[in-house]
Image (spheres, rainbow, N blue to C red):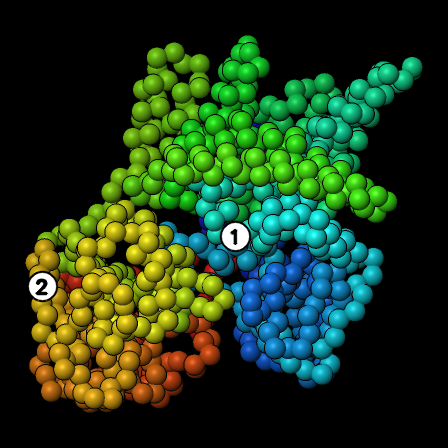
């Protein structure tokens, strides 16, 4: 059985590494081979092929359900039920809709949309959880930025079953009404969250209790998340394995002890306790919204209950493998989430520790388990966070139990009492709030007194897995040989510094930040950042989401020079975040950029050389013409490496281009950053004729509201035979300039997976 389960899991996981899926008809081939393998007494091969076929089919179903290109930005009428809780993100309200029908021009649209992520702003409607709505919307395909070291938003959307994103548009036919029995759970969750908020003083405490009660994490503020990350306790405020298991265990103990006192029920008490515990855990998971992590937790508990029913250990390797196979059989896409790997990784550590230290005392075993969890999961956690919370064993061993066995039971007791005895329910919630404040004081003290350690470079997933296996080898009963085995694995999976360009060469990365700009320039020993990416009104900060993760991925600890071409939010939005989290030796701003504190202003004629690579500011002039715009005062940087030249133009328009033409000899470049994202006001014919680039780089957002790049501008480049490389299509763009020649690489092509979108 072990071999069959392992083969099935391997088949499912292998598909998630494929850049593309075969056509549905090709599924017949692996199924026929699986049938042949069964007849030839090769069940493991058959199980692997069945897992592979199942994962391919589920992937094809997900891709087929996504919004077709032809329906993007079209006015559609959708009907469906609001699922989950709505999230207030001023000035927008965000929510998810489970689709029942889609119409275009009052005719059914031939598409199988399942779930939409929507926002409502100025649409004269406020959807509530559980309601059934008819809405007019404009949708776009699931799309996200794609950068080395960054978060793969498209993968997250695909795993969550989000088939399109969009916004509600104002229309007199928009309306929402009761969702019936299907929407009763979400409506009840929203009501409970409101009651807890009214009963508990303080928005921060109410946010935590709402997260523990109904899974509403959106109300936690940045400070709370920072403290939880610094102490390795973010799992504490998510309703998943920890709290669901607590509910199951508490109910199991209660029923087992209670029935054990009843004559004639002693034999049945343990099994009835298992069933009751599983039912209670399922109820708590439903209260939390029946999300994928809670479903996974209930399924894992069911596997443990079945094994306990049959007389096996509650947690061992066979049970873990069975749970893993069942989770992937239920949802092969679950493996695309980091929580999947963290939860099963934690259980694997507990299995290993339990097998090695069975004779250890209760207290030593408790502390040892938390210590090994922190050590062995550190490489995996480093792939999603640049911080190592070294106080995590202490926080999880001493403070988290107060939440698991104190705060959560009081919150759940309040929920049970609220329909019949509101006063007692409020008292329970207030008591939970007081206990949480004690826990919070301890967490805050740990975070402030013993801040987390930063990793030198964020490891890749293979590096993290090898590092975790190397540390796990220390638990194996191999005597002294385990140290050599561990050192070998750690050496193979060690986070080695990534190669830097040789002297005289330069590596330039145009990061995929959407509608904005951030360009990283690496020489052998220096780093320059040209612009900091956008910050939107909705709170998305490319400095935090894209630039800093990329810098950590590359192992950079300092920015030697940060140039912000001008003060527009799409170029300077991430500046504050970058300055807060990364040391900057020199900050250079445009003359019109208002800034408190000493900075250097860019002006034509400034030059410097790093590691054999030449840098020169070509614009703006030291005395800008009166009345020049912010865009026309943008810093323009020329980089020279060997015989190649790169021109970074930011948002200059035709007036600034005309000024630069006075030095036409300095404009000649092999690579040109398309001015102003391809706006009609830039890329004049005379300017392009002076630069004469071979390649043009375009940093622009997918289906942005400005309509950039303008078709007329693209035509000018095409007429001159200039190749345009676009971040929408390519993701992050990396160039190598220098004596070896010019190379251009697109990250979307290098990291291609079957769920990644293509097309502009």
Q: Quadrant of residue 126?
A: bottom right
Q: Quadrant of residue 542?
A: bottom left
Residue at image point 18% right, 87% down: 625
From the image, tell me which residue sits under label 2: 608
Label 2 crowd (10 A; few <14 / some 14-19 / many >=20): few
From the image, tell me which residue sits under label 1: 221
Please, is residue 196 above or below residue 80 in the view?
above
Residue at image point 44% right, 19% down: 475
Q: Which quarter of the rendering shows the C terminus? A: bottom left
Q: Give the total number of marks visible in the rendering.
A: 2
Residue at image point 39% right, 35% down: 449
Q: Secondary structure at mark 2?
A: strand
Where is residue 615 drawn, in percent x and y?
A: 12, 66
Label 1 crowd (10 A; few <14 / some 14-19 / many >=20): few
**Direction from residue 308 to residue 74 in the image, left or right:** left
Mark-to-mark CA distance, 2 and 1: 43 Å
Q: From where the camera sits, is residue 54 visible?
A: no
Where is residue 466 drawn, in percent x and y?
A: 38, 33
- Residue 373 versus residue 565: which sits nearer the camera? 565
Q: Earlier in the sequence, mark 2 or mark 1?
A: 1
Q: Secondary structure at mark 1?
A: loop
Q: From where the camera sits, is residue 135 visible?
A: yes
Disc 2 versus disc 1: nearer the observer: 1
């Amino acid at each position: 059985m072990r071999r069959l389960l392992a083969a099935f899991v391997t088949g499912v996981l292998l598909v998630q590494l494929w850049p593309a899926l075969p056509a549905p008809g090709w599924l017949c081939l692996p199924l026929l081979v699986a049938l042949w393998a069964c007849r030839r007494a090769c069940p493991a091969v058959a199980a692997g092929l069945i897992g592979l076929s199942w994962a391919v089919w589920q992937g094809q179903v997900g891709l087929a359900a996504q919004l077709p290109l032809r329906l993007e930005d079209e006015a559609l009428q959708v009907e469906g039920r609001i699922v989950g809780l709505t999230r207030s993100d001023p000035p927008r309200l965000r929510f998810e809709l489970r689709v029942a029908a889609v119409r275009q021009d009052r005719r059914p649209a031939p598409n199988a949309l399942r779930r939409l992520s929507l926002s409502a702003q100025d649409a004269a409607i406020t959807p509530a959880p559980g309601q059934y709505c008819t809405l007019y919307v404009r949708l776009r395909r699931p799309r996200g930025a794609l950068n080395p070291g960054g978060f793969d938003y498209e993968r997250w959307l695909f795993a969550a079953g989000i088939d399109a994103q969009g916004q509600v548009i104002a229309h007199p036919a928009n309306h929402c009404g009761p969702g019936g029995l299907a929407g009763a759970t979400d409506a009840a969750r929203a009501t409970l969250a409101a009651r807890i908020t009214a009963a508990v003083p303080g928005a921060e405490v109410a946010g935590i209790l709402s997260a523990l009660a109904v899974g509403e994490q959106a109300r936690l503020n940045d400070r709370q998340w920072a403290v939880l990350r610094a102490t390795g306790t973010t799992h504490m405020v998510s309703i998943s394995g920890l709290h669901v298991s607590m509910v199951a265990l508490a109910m199991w103990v209660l029923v087992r002890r209670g029935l054990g006192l009843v004559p004639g029920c002693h034999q049945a008490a343990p099994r009835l306790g298992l069933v009751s515990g599983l039912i209670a855990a399922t109820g708590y998971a439903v209260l939390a919204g029946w999300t994928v992590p809670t479903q996974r937790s209930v399924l894992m508990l069911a596997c443990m209950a079945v094994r306990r029913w049959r007389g096996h250990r509650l947690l061992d390797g066979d049970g873990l493998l069975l749970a893993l196979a069942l989770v992937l059989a239920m949802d092969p896409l679950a493996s695309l989430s980091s929580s999947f790997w963290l939860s099963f990784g934690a259980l694997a550590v507990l299995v290993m520790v339990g097998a090695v230290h069975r004779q250890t005392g209760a207290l030593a075993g408790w502390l040892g388990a938390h210590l090994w969890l922190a050590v062995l999961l550190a490489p995996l956690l480093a792939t999603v966070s640049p911080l190592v919370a070294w106080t995590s064993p202490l926080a999880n061993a001493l403070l988290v139990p107060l939440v698991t066995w104190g705060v959560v039971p009081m919150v759940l007791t309040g929920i049970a009492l609220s329909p019949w005895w509101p006063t007692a329910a409020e008292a329970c919630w207030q008591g939970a709030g007081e206990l949480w404040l004690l826990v919070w004081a301890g967490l805050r003290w740990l975070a402030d007194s013993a801040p987390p350690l930063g990793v030198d470079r964020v490891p890749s997933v293979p590096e993290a897995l090898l590092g975790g296996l190397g540390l796990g080898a220390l638990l194996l009963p191999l005597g002294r040989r385990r140290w050599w085995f561990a050192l070998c694995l750690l050496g193979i999976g060690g986070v080695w510094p990534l190669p830097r360009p040789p002297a005289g060469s330069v590596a330039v990365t145009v990061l995929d930040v959407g509608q904005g700009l951030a360009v990283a320039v690496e020489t052998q020993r220096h780093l320059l950042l040209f612009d900091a990416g956008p910050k939107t009104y909705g709170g998305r900060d490319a400095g935090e989401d894209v630039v800093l993760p990329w810098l950590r991925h590359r192992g950079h600890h300092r920015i030697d020079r940060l140039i912000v071409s001008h003060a527009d939010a799409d170029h300077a939005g991430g500046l504050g975040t970058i300055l807060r989290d990364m040391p900057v030796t020199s900050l250079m701003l445009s003359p019109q950029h208002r800034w408190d504190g000493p900075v250097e202003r860019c002006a034509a004629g400034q030059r410097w050389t790093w590691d054999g690579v030449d840098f020169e500011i070509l614009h703006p002039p030291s005395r800008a013409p009166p009345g020049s715009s912010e865009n026309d005062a943008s810093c323009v940087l020329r980089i020279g490496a060997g015989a190649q030249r790169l021109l970074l133009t930011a948002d200059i328009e035709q007036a600034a281009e005309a000024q630069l033409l006075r030095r036409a000899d300095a404009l000649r470049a092999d690579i040109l950053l398309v001015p102003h994202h391809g706006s009609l006001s830039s890329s004049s014919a005379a300017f392009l004729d002076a630069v004469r680039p071979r390649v043009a780089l375009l940093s622009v957002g997918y289906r942005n509201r400005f309509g950039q790049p303008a078709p007329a501008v693209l035509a000018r480049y095409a007429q001159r035979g200039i190749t345009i490389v676009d971040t929408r299509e390519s993701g992050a763009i990396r160039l190598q300039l220098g004596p070896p020649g010019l190379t251009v690489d697109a990250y979307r092509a290098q990291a291609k997976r079957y769920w990644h979108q293509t097309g502009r």
